[in-house]
Amino acid sequence: MVKNYFIPTEQNNNKPYLLRKIAIVAYSILLILVNTMGGFLGIEEAYASTITPGNIISLTNKERNAGGLNTLSNNPKLASAALAKANDMLEKQYWDHFGPNGETPWQFIRASGYAYVYAGENLAKGFRTSEGVVEAWMASPTHRANIMSGNYKDIGIAVVEGQLLGKQTILVVQMFGNLTSSVQGVAESPKPKVEKPSVPTKPKVVTGDSKVVTPKEQGEIRSIQILSPENGGTYMEPSMNVKGQANNIEGEYIIDVVEGDKVLGSTKSNRSTWEVEKGSDWSEGEHKIVANLNGTEVKSQEVSFIMDSTAPKVDLQSVMVEDHEEQYVLKFNILGDWDSINIILGSEILPVVETKGQQSILASIPKDKDTSSIFINLADKVGNSSSVDISEYFVKEEAQEDSTKKIIPLIGLSVKDGINIGIVLFVFTLLLVEIVIYARRGQLKQAAGDLFTVGAWWLVISVAIFNGFSGIIT
């Protein structure tokens, strides 16, 4: 009977066939084959990840802000340079800051049109999460030095999946830059100058009997300020917190940040600085906020700023490629305001010169260029950027192959990872069912030894399988 394979019965001597030693050995052999010889068996190892340029930038700025450093601005030219560098590593099959033919990070940055005074690069591969990438960089002294350098003002990120040195992996290229010689040292968070109110000479009051009376001083004036966002500024991070300073306030106090008649968030502090986390993302457009000292009439000056976090995008339905004798003519429309366009052809950056504000774009691509990997990078004036892969539009119909990635839906795993998780969950489910049945029969104590042995062994196998979820940095 089928149930003899899954649950303990008298027919299988209270030991399901699928949990016997021979079955466990078979599962283990299958897992070994999948994880060591998956490529030879034709099992696709490509996988999705939660790594995005936005996440990397946000986590990098979080580390910098914690160290009292300036926030780096997303720069589309550096992003184009990072993408070109990633494509170059995949094209020439190397994993280093310097290529086999003397390629340097700086040549990609210069080719993007970014005339740097200071520049730097971090690389990572094989990670599944943005947090894992940044944590690894911060644990490495040289990579941490780049992230925490006061020399930089701009950042660009590329996240590319491909076959590198015989293994399907995800590459992350992080490039830093500064167009000026102005730098910031690693120091405490800068404190704005606060003009102390002038203290007038204490008045002397003459009474009728000629006695001189000096009134008691009432203390310094309490005040609060909003330091970030700055008045008149434009910001791209919808989850941005409000930061400020309190003067002459002793003990614990509460700050409310208010927009109109709505309290956006509150915080308690017993220091001279405070930070309020908004309960939801800032909406697009102009905002006017005030900070109130809870329970008093003390409030900050109003701060007006603009939230602009929407990047221009390529209208994919408008993309057309015309095949001419010596060149391809690429046509596409842009949704939203834009300031710069770059077309990334493999490791080459092709600037597009168009009239600002024009929504329909026309570009010529020579046929001697590498069209196997083509991206369009767009950016607006404040640095919001987007990137789209249009390689498929340049593949001839007769040469097209099934490019559907064999990725397990919803959970972003490769076929290999799907098999691993499937087998592990299957065995642990059988163990759980067996434990429940033994417990109902009052036989759990007698079976505890076997259950513990199988469970412990399978736990060790599971840990060994998933130790590949970390990656490599350089």
Image (cartoon, grey):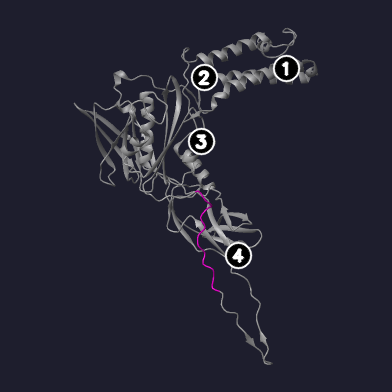
Q: Farthest left residue? A: 325
Relative image position of residue 327 (x, y in whole percent): 22, 29
Q: Please give the range of residues in magenta.
A: 186-198
Structural distance between the alpha carbons of marks 4 and 1 = 65 Å
Q: Dot 1 corresponds to which residue? A: 451
474 up-or-down from 237: above or below: above
The disc, 1 or 3, on the residue closer to the chain's N-terminal end is 3
Ranked by sequence position, the earlier of labels 1 and 2 is 2
Q: Is residue 267 above or below residue 88?
A: below
Can you identify the residue that label 4 sits on?
A: 248
Q: Nearer the viewer, mark 4 or mark 1?
A: 4
Q: Which residue is mark 3?
A: 137
Instruction: State which tag comes first along the sequence, 3 or 2.
Output: 3
Q: Is residue 238 left or right of residue 18?
A: left
Check if mark 2's residue and mark 4's residue have beta carbons within 8 Å: no
In this rendering, which labeled residue sits more in front, label 2 or label 4?
4
Which of the 4 image quadrants contains residue 14?
top right
